[in-house]
Amino acid sequence: MRAVIPAAGIGTRLKPHTYSLPKVLLNVGGKPILGHIIEKLLVEKINKATFVTGYLGEKIVEYVHKEFPSLKADFVEQEEALGLGHAIQVAIPTFDDDEIFIILGDTIFDVDLKKVFLNKNSSLGVKMVDDPSRFGVAVCENEKIIKLIEKPKETISKLALVGLYYITNANLLKESLNDLFNKKIKTRGEYQLTDALQIMIDKGERLTTFQVEGWYDCGKPETLLSTNQFLLTKCGTNRRVENVVINDPVFISENAIIKNSVIGPFTTISENCEITDSIIRNSIVSSGAKIEKAMLENSIIGSNAIVKSNFRKLNTGDSSEIEFN
Ligand code: UTP
């Protein structure tokens, strides 16, 4: 089986972090989003993967080669991000198996893949959501998907596609993607994977769904921070530092230098950070950042950024009321 990981997007919603780093390489829970995904694939013995790159793609190539030398990695370039359907179409020349597992490069999931791969037919990861209007949705009869609709205007189903697609008939997917392009079928201006999968259904292919309860999106600052929270509860570190109060769960890199501070809960401190006289909670501090005399909450601090604040000097009378905003 081959994994296909679309990672060509610009990550607009995560600017300014994505000015210098592709979204999939942003640090969450102590390592890049892509690192979490690849580790999961390797556990399942999926050791062939196609990365669809575009924006800052050379950084993805460098990261994968450096951190995962045992992975047989192919890289294809999507010159313009014309949609997920287009991203997968660009990857077609690397398809060499009937089974492919497509996983969005900005999605961390917690699902029993062994069970998913027991399916004899193609199966798509779904989750019940309150507002399905920003997702592709599946309408099912019994187990079978009868219709897929990208970003429905009316709530026809609350079963959202969450970015995991197990395909057992790669040839038919190829054919359907080619149809999508030949007929120029676009939804909201993009070539959608959902529309290509609908073509597969129209051609008679049986598609089913599997439930993904643990689905952690990394597309926006708020979701990146909540995914960080989830990952830290699973794989935080136990590092203790003299004169530093650590409120678990946290990830603290072995070579981060921290003095006189309170770290956590839910805080990632990456390699080579220097933190002094600060309180940091529910935040991600990227590599090489320096923070001094600062109180930070719900923050994402970029690599090598410098944040300096100061202690206040007060000389108040009795019964004064002072509030700093
Ligand atoms: P998103 O649409 O969420 O990612 O696509 P984005 O475009 O990078 O983010 P925003 O909307 O600008 O903030 C989900 C995943 O699919 C990939 C993205 O890289 C991301 O990993 N993708 C999307 C592609 O590779 N190509 C595309 O044409 C679209």
Image (cartoon, grey):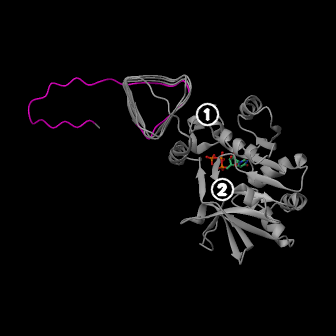
Q: Quadrant of the C terminus?
A: top left
Q: Which residue corresponds to mark 2?
A: 111
**In the rendered structure, which disc, 1 or 2, sits on the residue that comes first in sequence?**
1
In the picture shown, does residue 169 fall above or below 276? below
- In-front residue for pair 112/7: 112
Circle 1 SS class: helix
In the picture, residue 316 is in which quadrant?
top left
For the stretch drawn in magenta, what is the main secondary structure?
loop
Measured from the top left, where is residue 230 in percent x and y? 53, 47
In the picture, residue 27 is in which quadrant?
top right
Q: Which residue corresponds to mark 1?
A: 19
In the picture, residue 10 is in which quadrant?
top right
Measured from the top left, where is residue 283 in percent x and y? 47, 38
Q: Residues within 10 Å of mark 2 (few under 14, many from 20)?
A: some
* Disc 1 to disc 2, C-alpha distance: 31 Å
Query: Label 2 sits on what residue type?
Result: Val
Q: Can residue 158 be seen?
A: yes
Q: Residues within 10 Å of mark 1 (few under 14, many from 20)?
A: some
In the picture shown, does residue 280 fall above or below 242? below
Measured from the top left, where is residue 134 in percent x and y? 60, 60
Measured from the top left, where is residue 187 in percent x and y? 72, 61
Q: Can residue 78 be seen?
A: no
Query: Would residue 94 be counted in the magenta stretch?
Result: no
Q: How many marks?
A: 2
Query: Label 1 sits on what residue type?
Result: Tyr
- In-front residue for pair 195/273: 273
Mark nearer the viewer, 1 or 2 = 2
Part of the protein shown in magenta: 297-324
Circle 2 SS class: loop
Query: Would residue 321 be counted in the magenta stretch?
Result: yes
Residue name at image x 80 percent, y 37 percent: 71
**Residue 258 appears left or right of 115:** left
